Amino acid sequence: MSEAPAPALAANELTVELGGRAALEDVAFRLPPGASVALLGPNGAGKTTLLRAAVGLVRPSSGSLRRGPGSVAFVPQRLDVEPSFPATVADVVRMGRYGELGWLRRFGDRDRALVSRAIEELGIGPLAGRRFGDLSGGERQRALLAQATAQDARLLLLDEPFAGLDAPTNQVLRERIRRWRDEGRTIVVATHDLQSASRDYDLVICLNRRLVAIGRPAEACTEEVLAETFAGRVVRVGDLLIDTAHHHHGAG
């Protein structure tokens, strides 16, 4: 009998303290490889902290957070840079290969192919020669998503990637997440969007410093669970659940 595959991401009694207070408390879960996961919760729930802990940017105070085999890509919620930042969009996408190559090894055919494909798939060919600091928010997000695509990672962590996107970029991102999943990658998307969480993902993690629920959308996106997750700021209007703090809609 074959063994179950190693989880793509597993938390065990994970607690993270930031500035003398607990950002995450005693969180435990196991994410299977090849799943799309919505990480749902209000501001201050610890979503960003969890993603940053998964890539080693913050350290657990206790417990553990372990990744499965393969590389990881992290797309932050926002990347502020000086307008004079000299790197072009093509440079930013190429940076996605440095984690595997290191800074001293030369690009090979595979690296160039991954960068070219990422630029094409995210539709940023016309932007390739522009400075990253000159881009709009949506254009920067596309460039960062292309960088993540070029990494060819098995685990992708996206922190509020839909925030402030224009409609075309929003659709590009949704298609990119579906494609990553179809390729057998694991994608974790931090979001406030109840409708998308209940419709677009294999699993939902409901988080408010502690783990409230994890499961299929039908199990995790119930009115009771969401009310606990969002501290009562979810109300029902007909067949919709509304997060009153962000005015995102979700199916009940």
Image (tube, rainbow, N blue to C red):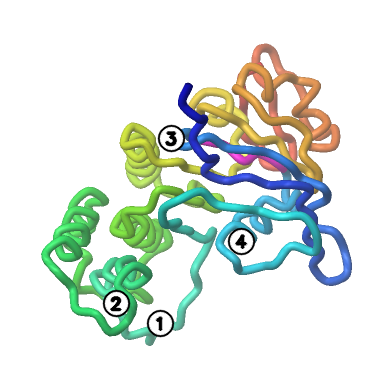
For this view, does 95 lie left or right of residue 214?
Answer: left
Specify start and end residues of the magenta stretch as a single range.
37-41
Question: What kind of secondary structure does the magenta stretch mostly adopt?
Answer: strand
Badge nearest the viewer, 4 or 3:
3
Front label number (2 vs 3): 3
- How far apart, in angstroms, are the residues tagged by discs 1 and 2? 8 Å
User: Left or right: 194 with respect to 6?
Assistant: right
The residue to which callout 1 is attached is: 83
**Can you identify the residue that label 3 sits on?**
34
Q: Which mark is residue 141?
A: none
- Pointer 4 with pointer 2, Cβ within 8 A: no
Most distant residue in the top direction: 238
Give the Cα separation between the discs numbered 4 and 2. 26 Å
Labels 3 & 1 near each other (Cβ < 8 A): no
Q: Earlier in the sequence, mark 1 or mark 4?
A: 4
Q: Earlier in the sequence, mark 4 or mark 2?
A: 4
Residue 188, magenta (yes or no) = no
Taking 34 as reference, is 151 above or below it?
A: below
The residue to which callout 2 is attached is 131
Give the residue at x 73% y 47%: 12
